[in-house]
Structures are given as structure tokens and as C-alpha cells.
Amino acid sequence: MPILRIEHLKKYYGKDPQTTVKALDDVSLSVEKGEFLAIVGTSGSGKSTLLHMLGGLDRATSGKVFVDGNDIFAMSDEKLTIFRRRSVGFVFQSYNLVPILNVLENILLPIELDGGRIDQQYLNEVIGALGLQEKIHNLPSNLSGGQQQRVAIARALATKPSIILADEPTGNLDSKTSQEVLILLKQMSKKFNQTIVMITHNESIAQTADRIIRIEDGRIFSGNAASSGASLL
Amino acid sequence: MISTNNRKIVTRLSLKSLKANPMRNLAVICAVILTTLLITSIFTMVLSLNKSMELTQMKTSGTDFHGGFKYLTRAQVETLKKHSSIREYGVMLNAGDLRNEVFKDSPVEVKRIDESSARHSFVDFIEGGLPSAENEIVLSTWVMDKLGIKHALGQKASLDIDIGERVVQQDFIVSGYYEADKNLSMAGLAFVSDAWVQKNLSSIDPVKSKASGSYVNTAELSVMFSNAVDIEKKLNKVLADTGLDVPTGINWAYTTSSLSENIINLVPYLAVILIIMLSGYLLIYNIFYISVVRDVKFYGLLKAIGTTPRQLKRIITIQSQMLYLVGLPFGLASGYGIGRALTPLLGTLSDEPVETSYSASPWIFIGAAAFAYLTVWIAASKPGRLAARIAPVEAVRFAGVSAKRKMNKRSKRGAKLYGMAFANLFRNKKKLFLMLTSLSLSMILFSIIFTVISSLDVNKYLSSYIAGDVVIRNRAIVQSAGEQPGDPYKLSGPFIGALGKIDGVKRVDSVYYKFENYTIDDTIRAALKPLAETASPEPALTWVLKNNFIQLNLYGIDAGWYDLVQKDVIEGSFDPQKFASGSYVLVTESTMVGDTYESYYHPGDHIEYKGLGKSYEVMAVLNYNALYAATTHVFSPYGYNAFFPSSELTRKLPAGSKPPMALSVTLHVDPAKLDSAAQTAKSLAASSDELVYKSREDYRQELGGFIRIFQTVGYGLSFVIALIGVLNYINTVITGVITRKNEFALLESIGMTKRQLKKVLVYEGLFNVLLTVSITSTLGVFLTYSISKSIADSMAFTVFHMGWLPFILAVPVLAAIAYTVTLSSYRMLSKDTIVERLRQTE
């Protein structure tokens, strides 16, 4: 059973038919549990928009997104936010750590916002795996780019989400750090049986994924969009 | 759905966010302090004024007991005082009246009171205490002055006490005396001992003395209930429970128009509080709005991670509440101080003598805190909603510019600096609107206050009260409506003659006064009937029609007043020579329903006045308040003033008609001898209690005091609001520059010089000034004109003229502020290099 299912997703900007920008034009896709999917495309191809839709950060013009069987666009803003913080972990290109909170606070933020209990053992495991033990009381501004991205990954994993959405997670990092981060990301997802959808424009990084789909002009250009992940394993 | 333990993180986030914005916090705290301070001081003034008025009224009514039972026998007192609803009581026994010659015009009642009554009747002993021996007595300092004895214990006072059956002549020894304000207490009082009562009154039957009207040996039981609500009902309940039927009295100080009872009196204060709240709101709202816009990335990020809209709102709310709590105590404390300092000033605005007393009611603080909280809450709620609405994806791009901008820009002139500046202004219309509103509001308020103050006309004020250089009025007549003791005939012919002989006095103009209940004639009935045929006619009108007479004030004026008649003529024409002949009358318009004025008569009509025993032809109709300085200043509803030459009132009047009273004497003095003549007149007037001496200079000073209060409060208020407006402006400009740091760096990177950038900013400032001025010079002028005209028209001594100065002055002042603020915000900007600034985006 797919953990993520997209049906005829469209996102248009602008009402005037002459100037309408079709960021996503009838995209359908399904992702199996535990799969690592890479979405590649040039800038402006609509890949970021697709990712935002998957995580419920933005709403579609038409079409549906099912996460774990839940129609996320049918939810209210409030409910969607709560659903997102429980089921989806985000990793952004620009890390997007809260500058006024230290590393530990940043990692714990989604759990605490949810009012949930902290699984200390799991947390230690994540922090240890990401090599952040020494840094947990640092403010984000005192960390290098790679360290910041590791904090962001830890934050994304904190609530044990079923899906991790990563938007060019290595975009701001040098190639060596990129490899490290990528390996960590993959390890973690295997360890906790999580699904990863990652955007990148770097072909070599995309190659590490279980499956690659290419997006151009808002449409899926190549790649087996409807294939089941199992066949690729 | 939301479990309670996520509150902790929301609070923590709020605290962290607070820590990250020290400057903004300071600004909000200052705004909270300012708002609370102003509201608290208003509350303090209103409640203190209310308390002062209540106290004054209680002093006038003589006690702060809730009410009492009158003309009781001793047995009745014993029965009544045991009733369970009575918390406290005092017994006062009527012992008689003083008949000494000096008290002919100002009655002094003799009583026997207990400690409780003394305490509740404002009898504060300067020395001594209540009498115990038979020959001991307590007097007020005023009575002692009248008797010509020194203010000291053990003084001998020889008194004639009328106890109804006879007059007891006895020498008393003063056992105590107290300060009594003769303006406040209705009648003078003297207190005798119980021993004296036993000796002299035990034979008098209270029932009989009550029937005879002397009331000697009857007692009054004054009581205090648990509260002052519906005193009449409580008194009646006591009567019903005890089965007695005796007269009761309610202390009207608890029922009559204290400030809190009369909602209309509160309206101006409420309006001021609303203005304060509005400007406080504008300030706090603006600060939070800008802070949310500036931190939009932060909030968008929080939302992306999973902070719900409600939690985001709470983050803003908690921050505002914490800042409110920090500012509150300072605002309350300083506001209370300022309020107390201003209360005496406010008290002097009232016509009646008011003794200032300060309220420390917890309601001042509760109310001010509540209003300030409301302001903060409303001000923070909208920025909170804004933060909650931020779309997580937008967060990264948001720069305070509305995303829904459809407008196409078709410019042929290219990117001119002023064009850019002008376009920049409208990038955030809401911010622009807020800033313009607060700046314009403060300017309009200032110009209204300025216009009203400059409309106050000293000459008009003076002519309303005094026609010559010195006036001596008989207070006993002017306040005849109250129970002011005094001789209404104190201004006698010989006295006026003596005034005329003072060296330097050129002319003496007297006004004689007579009161007439005029039986309603056909003309008046025709005018009043239609007014009474409404669903709920005015009580005063019903009263007039039922009694079939209207109350007229008849004035006899000396020739000196004739010059002042002409300006008030509204119908007919005034001919001094014909008027002096004594066959003519000048009538004023009557005060009709709802402050309208109308005359019953027209020139040529004939009116017969019974008190004068003669019929007069109406020569002219005057304004209702014509010759205001000559009148008693009292207008009875549906009645009017009639003016005659003074000879018509001083001549021999028909039998049974009361002789006229001399109301006032106005002296016209040779300027060279003004000082000495005024001194002499003053000392002559000082010889009696009834005569009040006032010079032109006295009135001038009174108005000066009034203007000073008006200026202090008015300019103070507009200064504060102007300060808020300017703070708002500074805030908007500086944050506008901060949020555009990146954009400016970009512009510089593509070749805009710093000089050019500075120019753009200066243009922006100037356009702001231009917009503000265009608002104030259109809407502002209109509002100033209409509001200050209506205020000026409702005040007696104003001549409205529009004050243009604030509008003209505002332009350079605003321009200077705009220039300074722009330059300092520019200086903040240019410290970092272009690359550093460009990098700061992400």
C-alpha cells in the first residue's frame, strides 16, 4: 500500500489564461513505504512546488494528495498543521533553523509544539547518529552549514514521521559534506523505516535514491511514476 | 485536540522571541506605560472629582448618614434604633433657635448631639469636645465671629435660645469649637449638653411642639444602612417593621447628581479615554505589526515545522501580555500621581466651591488596568492573526509586500528617484494608512484645542459678568433658590449713596430686582399649549400649566446699562429716551423645550405686571441672556426677564407688592484713582456677609485661571498624542528601512550611489509629510472647524475664530522631523558592506 499518493495534482498561478503559470500540470504519483525517491528537474520545473504540496505547505488548484490514506487538502489549516508536524518531516536547502533557539530546542520544537512526550532513547540515538552530541547547546549561528543541516535532519526525524521531505538538502553544502549528509539521511530512514522524497538538481546525488523521477514544465517527464517501489528494490 | 502541555513550549517560544527583540519590547512597554498613565490619570481625576462633589454635597446637606427619621419622641427613638438593618445611628435633639440680634438673617439652630452624630456631621473640633455641664456649649468659628468672641476654649457666650414657649437667656462657656464653612453648611449650629436639655426642655411635650412648628425637644434619628442603594425603601421597611409612622428624610447627597449618577457628565471623559485608547492602540498595533512583518520568516518557519495558527497567535498574545505586565505598574503609579496633581485644577473649573478630596478607590486601578489591557489585547490580536495566516511557503519570500499585486507598471519616465520614492510609499498601504492616521489625528487634536483656546474671549467674558470697573452684588438674592441665609435688602439706598461718594467714582449704576409669578395670559397659553400636547411633555411645562403661572424676573436698570441693550435686540428697536419715560418694557425670549428660545410677545404688545400695578408697552424683544451681567444669572423655564428703568421699581408700588431688592451696584471709576477707590469699595462691602465685591481684574484672573487649566490639560493631551504620532512615524520609517536593507544593497550593487539612496529616502519622508498635510488641510480643517466651532458655541464666553497657525506651523515641524528621522535611519543602514548586506537574505 502506497504511503503517498498524488492524483491529478495541478497548481496554477494567476487567473488570466494568457499569463497563467502552470507550476504543476496534472501530476500523478505514488510512493511506497520505505522508498527513497529523488525528484530531479531544472529550476522552475515545479519540483519545489510539488514538494510543498506533498507536505501541505501550500494548497493545490485541483487534485488530491493522500498521505497514509489521509486527504490532506480536506483538512483545515489548523488540522493540517497538526497532521504535518506528526507525519511529515521537512529538510530545507536553507536549513531554516529557528535562530533564537539552540540546537536541542530546535530539534525538540516539533514534539513540544505537539505537546507529546519526548522519547529520550530515540532522541539520543538520532543525535548520536548525526554527531550532534557536542553541539546541542549551541545556537544555529555558531554552526557550520553541514552541522546546521544535520540539526535540520534531526528535527525532521524527531517526531518519527512516516515521510521525510527534503528540498535540495545539500544545495548549500560542499560536495564532501553533501555526501556525509546524504549518507546520514539514508541511514536514518532505513533505520526507522521512513519514506524519503528528496528534490535535487544534482544527478550524482539523485543516483543514490531507490527511484528517480524527472519533472519538466510541471509534468513528470520520465521515470516510472506509478511503479511500485518494491520492484526496484 | 491540543493537549495542555504544549503551552510550555509556546510560552518558551514567546519568551525567546521577547529576548530577541529588546528595542521593540522597550517601545511596547513605553506605549503601555503611556496608555496606562493617561487612562489612570483620567480615572483618578474623575473619581476624585466625584468624591469631592459627593463630599461637598454631604457637607451641604450636613451629614453623611444615609437618611433619618424626624420629629421623634424618645420612646420612638428607642424603638427605631433597635432595627436590625441599621448599622450605625446618631441621635440629634432639637433644642431651639438662637434669637440674638446678630443672627436675624442667618438662623442658628441649637441641638444636642451624640458623638456619632458629631462624627457624621463634619463637626471636626479644633479644640475641645461635646459639652457635658449644663452651661457648656459648642459653637462653630463662624458663629463665634458673629458673636464677636475669640476662638478659644472657655470663652463666654451670651445666648438667647428660643425654645418655643419662651426664650432662655443664658451665659454659656465654650467647651469646644469647630471650623464650619458657612458656604457649605446650610444653617449654623450650636450644641448644648444633655444636662441643659434635662433642665430646660423636660417639660416640653415633643408631640405638642411638633404641632406648633417649633419642633423643640423632638429628636432626629439618623441612620447608616449597609449601603446607599434605595435608601427610601430601607427607611420605609424600618417603619413598616416597627409599626411607626413618622416623617423620614433621605440624604440627597447620595441621590442627586454626583458625577457617577449623571452619565452625560461622563461623556467627555469617556471620549478622552477613547482617544487615548485609540492612539495607544495605533502605537502598539503598529509596533507589533511591523515586528511580525519583520519576523515573517520566523513565523512562517514555525508554521512549516508544525506550529498551528492558534499557537502562533498565542505567541504574539503572550508577548504582548508580558510587556503589558511590565509596563502596567509604572503606568498606574505615575498616572495616579499625575491624576492627583491635576484634580485640584479640575475642581476649580466648577462654579460651586468644591473641596478637593482624593479617591484611592481600587476601581481606578482596576478600571485603568482593564482599559489598558483591552487596548493591548486589541492591538496585538490583529498582528497575531497576521502571523497565524502566514503561508509557510510565503514565509521565505515575504518582505512586507502584498503578494496579490496585480497592478502593472507602465512608466515612460524610467526609474526617477522621486518616482521610486513615491512608489515605495504605497508598497504597504496598511502601514501608510496607520502612520498617516496617527500623525493627522494628533495634528487635528492639537489644532482643535488651539482653536478653542484662541476663541476664548476675555472681553466677552468680562462683559458677561461686569459692566463697569467694580461690582458689588448681593449674594443673598443671587442664591435665593438655595437656602442661603442673608438679608436680600442689604444693598440699601444709603450704602449706594456712600459708594457714590468715594473719591474717583464717576458713576454708580444699580440694578433692582423683583420677582413675579405671572398668571398665564392667552398669548402665553397659546404658545405653551401645543408644546404640552406631546406624548411626554416636559415636567417643568406640566408644572407651569398646572400652577397657571410663569416665573418672571423683573429688573430695574439705571441709565448706565442702556448702552449695553442695543447689541441684544432681536425684534423692534431700543430708544433710550422713550424707555426712560417709564411706559415701556424690554422683554427677553423665554427658555422653552430643549434649549430653544422664543418670545411670547412682540414690540407693540401690552403687558400688565401686577407687582408693578401698571401696564407697559413692549419696546423690543431681547436675547434670552441679554444684559447677563445685570441679571441674577438664574433663568426659570418658560419665564423671561423684563427690564424697566430703575425708577419703575423704586417708585411706590401697589399695596401688598414686596419692595424691590437692590441686586448689584456697578461703579465706573476714574482710571487714575481706580486702586484707591476699589480699595474703599472693597472695605465697605466687606462689612457684611451678603455683599460680594468683584473688580474687573478679579474676573480677568478667574478667566486666566480657567484658560491655564484648559491649556495645561489640552496641550498636555495633544502633546502626548503628537508624541505617539511621531513615535509611530519613526517606527514605520526605521523598520521600513530595515526590511528593505537587502533591496537597498541590491540597488547599490547595480549602481545606485549612496547619495541617490539617501535622496530616495528623503523623498519618501517628504512625500509622507505632503500626504499628511494634504489630509490635515482638507479633512483636518473641516473637522477642526466643525468640532471646535460646536465646542466654542456651547461655551459662554467665546468668539469663534479659526486657528490657522497649527496647520501652517505643522508643515516645517513635520518636514524637520521627517528629515531627521530619515537621516538617522539611513545612517543605521550604511555601516555594512554591500556583500554583507546582500548575504543577509538567507
Image (tube, rainbow, N blue to C red):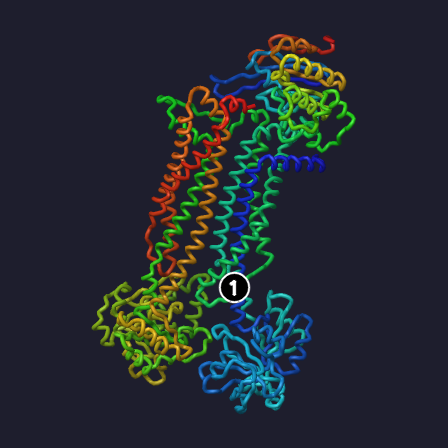
Q: Is residue A29 above or below residue B667?
A: above
Q: Which quarter of the picture shows residue A190? A: top right
- Label 1, secondary structure: give it: loop
Q: Quadrant of the N terminus of chain B?
A: top right
Mark 1 — on which chain does it sit?
B
Looking at the image, residue B672 sits to the left or right of residue B264; the answer is left
Circle 1: is it few (<14), some (14-19), or many (20+) Cα within 10 Å?
some
Q: Which quarter of the picture shows residue B348? A: bottom left
Q: Where residue B593 sits in the image (x, y, percent)? A: 40, 62
Q: Nearer the viewer, residue B136 or B618?
A: B136
Q: Is residue A73 above or below residue B358?
A: above
Residue position marked by numbered label 1 in the rendering: B258
Looking at the image, residue B574 sits to the left or right of residue B781; the answer is left
Q: Residue furthest right?
A: A121
Looking at the rendered structure, the kind of residue marked 1 is Ser
Q: Where residue B84 sits in the image (x, y, percent)? A: 69, 71
The residue located at (48%, 29%) in the rendering is: B829
Looking at the image, residue B720 sits to the left or right of residue B618; the answer is right
Q: Nearer the viewer, residue B645 or A100?
A: A100
Q: Where residue B567 sits in the image (x, y, percent)? A: 27, 63
The residue located at (55%, 35%) in the rendering is: B291
Q: Which quarter of the picture shows residue B663? A: bottom left
Tell me, yes or no, if residue B219 can be seen here: no
The residue located at (57%, 49%) in the rendering is: B330
Q: Quadrant of the C terminus of chain B?
A: top right
The residue located at (35%, 55%) in the rendering is: B455
Looking at the image, residue A160 sits to the left or right of residue A8; the answer is right
